[in-house]
Amino acid sequence: MEKKPTVASSFCLLLLCVATSTVAEVLEAHPHLHHQPHKNDGSIKLFVFGDSYADTGNVRKSVSPSWKEPYGITFPGKPAGRFSDGRVLTDYLAQFLGIRSPLPYALRKYAKKSKLENGMNFAYGGTGVFDTLVSGPNLTTQIGFFQQLLEQEKVYDKRDLIKSSVALVSVAGNDYTTHFVKPGNGSKDLAEFTKSIVKQIAVDLMRIRDLGVRKIAVTALEPMGCLPLLTSFLSYQNCSETLNLASMFHNQVLRQNVEQLNKESKKSAFIILDLYGAFLSAIKPQKDHQGKMMVQIDDPLKPCCVGVGSEYSCGSVDESTGAKKYGICRNPERSFFWDTVHLSQNGWNDVYSSLKSSLHQLYS
Ligand SMILES: *[C@@H]1O[C@H](CO)[C@@H](O)[C@H](O)[C@H]1NC(C)=O
Ligand SMILES: *[C@@H]1O[C@H](CO)[C@@H](O)[C@H](O)[C@H]1NC(C)=O
Ligand SMILES: *[C@@H]1O[C@H](CO)[C@@H](O)[C@H](O)[C@H]1NC(C)=O
């Protein structure tokens, strides 16, 4: 695999922007889901770790496009810290568990105690298992925040967690981005890099388990070669097979490690959420029962929100005039990708539909 300097510039652009905020705005902008399909006796808690696929408002307003228009236009109707036009993976998992989406860790000090009862979200957009191109807390540090709340601040009782708690861990995409933009890191080192990431993930999963979480869901790596950041060079027509192979290799090593962890932990505490399969089944044109092609998504590899030129990205504005420097597709509800790396709410909804059957293992 060649190094891809363009990845770095677009990636960094995503995280550069300016905005101001008040605490009240932040809290107001964090409404909750109403739909509760799964029965819950009120005790289940969801703890979330990882990156922008799971972050619901931890990254600071001043550094993140997730707090700028047009992010959040579908849900909650204005920018609220999610890297999407609406709901993300965390929200759908909370919905499945029949609880409200857990409070972002960064907002806990301003929240009423009752808001903590659904668990907490420690995920920060841009971060990884190891340190990445952004300065947010890596996975180890995020788990440290959780441990601090449990052991020092006693916000949660370990005995309650063992009875009924779930963790979501969404990681590794930003680790690969960081690896690819480092000079000299070609495909030769890739297998070694994958092994070192997965080794660290396994350590982190065990640590979450040892802190008392009952079931832990970790994401498989999405097909990296299908992210619009890369497919833009192919006019959003084809995925890069080379990069998808890298994702598949990561997922294979992850699966072996998680199987091993399940053997050691007896009760099969760990499950893998197959984002790879879920992304592909949403992206690939599908046939209905009569074999007719069903058009569910317009131009599936094309992001809904894009910058007007390569120097701009979704959410960019001209600094002097304040003019928008991005465009939005006509039907965000028929897109899969929202921006160059993130899914739209519709995309996450599709992914959730694919993952649903495996989510039942969280109750076994
Ligand atoms: C995570 O971040 C901490 C604090 O910056 C650092 O000491 C540690 O080495 C990092 N861990 C990994 C696995 O990269
Ligand atoms: C490749 O990246 C790793 C960290 O991801 C770094 O430690 C290593 O030095 C890099 N290799 C080269 C040849 O630059
Ligand atoms: C895209 O893939 C199709 C078939 O999968 C192939 O025919 C076409 O040449 C590819 N286009 C590019 C630009 O790689």
Image: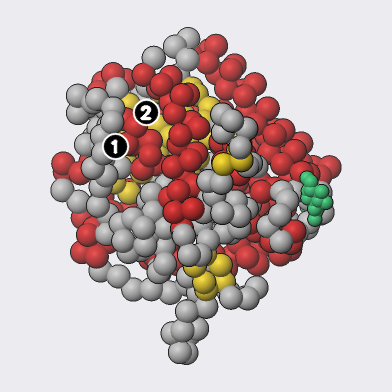
* Mark 2 nearby-residue class (10 Å; few <14, some 14–19, many ≥20): many
Amino acid identity at mark 1: Gly
Q: Is residue 159 above or below residue 238?
A: above
Figure quadrant of residue 160: top left
- Left or right of 100 in this view: 232: right
Residue under the point 43% across and 50% down: 345
Q: Which residue is mark 1?
A: 119
- Left or right of 159 in this view: 351: right
Residue under the point 47% across and 70% down: 315
Q: Is residue 61 above or below residue 230?
A: below
Residue 114 image position (x, y, % from top left): 16, 41
Amino acid identity at mark 2: Val
Find numbered disc 1 in the image and state the secondary structure of the residue it sits on. strand
Figure quadrant of residue 361: top left
Viewer can see residue 155: no
Viewer-closest of 255 and 135: 255
Find numbered disc 2 in the image and state the secondary structure of the residue it sits on. strand
Residue under the point 29% across and 22% down: 164
Viewer-closest of 147 and 46: 46
Q: Which residue is mark 2?
A: 166
Q: Is residue 337 above or below residue 46?
A: below
